Image (tube, rainbow, N blue to C red):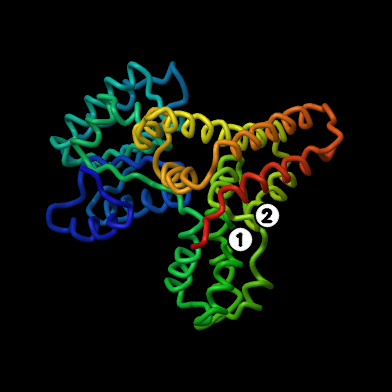
Amino acid sequence: MQIALAQLNQHLQGSGVKGVRTLYTLHGDEALLQQEAADAIRSVARGQGFTERMVFTVSGAHFDWGEVLAAGGSMSLFADKQIVEIRIPSGKPGKEGAVALQQIAESASQQDGVLTLVVLPRLDKASKSTAWFSALENNGASIQIDPIERAALPAWIAQRLQAQGQKVLGGEAGQQALQFFADRVEGNLLAAHQEIQKLGLLYPQGELSFEQIERAVLNVARYDAFKLSAAVLSGQPVRVQRMLDGLKAEGESEVFVHYALAEEIRALKRVKDAVAAGKALPMVLREQRIWGPRERLFERILPGLSASAIDKLLVSAHHVDGIVKGIRRADWPSDSWQALHRLAMRLCRACMPRTA
């Protein structure tokens, strides 16, 4: 059974009569949201008598799954109900673990005194298709923890502020304040949560001005090269500049940033050529493993992007590949980050939405 994260509290609040489920699986990379979801499950479970807790962290191939199986079967007539928490940071339980997880999942409904909570990172499609994950999902409740994307971050911040009795001013000024806040904390949701809590300590309940937010909120944004690629494909030059500055300040490898940008250009080239050869765009995108938000960006960009424009971008990417590896070129900046900036902006301008 899959439960959307937004529906988890409603699910737990409705568990009073029948009790919480005996098996929950949380999977995703957003640490704050995963922690909050786990806390919510534990809190309701404690209210229903699950007062003991055992935590197992699967640390490698030599992990003893027998201990986990024994913990789930060690209830006595007079023992308190217990939570057995299994953390698998790698997302790979191994052969023995896969068998154990299937056994745990299939026996979960028969163990009223044991609540099993399995915590996993973000899983790829292959992992979600395994027998062990299917057993967890089919015999319990599975909650996927998706990251808060940049476009949704201002609304998330506003919701969190409202929960502690605060809100930004209405109208355009309020939207500017939320956008400013989002720019400061993008890619670092745990720090965003801390900054929201800090506002609750600094100011009373009620409306917050832009000036109050500007004074209080630290710049704790964290970026990665693949999020930079998404911003470039979205045609957001101001955000691209901010992300490049952030990546440089964080000491990110210029070679890796170049790879992320160049790979997007190569992907555009492959898809464009395949479509020109007569293949349907949806089929090509599937073949190139382009899906989700990236798929929608490609669908928007490609009709307005000529083959010659992509070829020029490929030439630029080739030049920058040499620059980040120490090969100077007369018509390009010798500084790697300046060259990356030029390449990113050329691709960004090519991907900007066309106005009618």
**Kind of residue at badge 1:** Asp
Mark 2 crowdedness (10 Å alpha carbons): few <14, some 14-19, many ≥20: some
Residue for point 26% across, 48% down: 50
Residue for point 28% across, 55% down: 8
Height in image: 263 above or below 82? above
The alpha-carbon separation of the residues under discs 1 and 2 comes to 9 Å
Give the quadrant of the N terminus. top left
Is disc 1 in contact with disc 2, using a CB cutoff of under 8 Å? yes
Q: Mark 2 points at which residue?
A: 242
Is residue 70 visible in this depiction of the protein?
A: no
Q: In this view, does 43 lie to the left or right of 261?
A: left
Q: Residue 218 carries which label?
A: none
Residue for point 66% across, 44% down: 344
Residue 307 location (% of width, % of height) = 55, 36
Q: In this view, does 224 lie to the left or right of 10?
A: right
For label 2, the SS is helix
Q: Name the residue under label 1.
A: 183
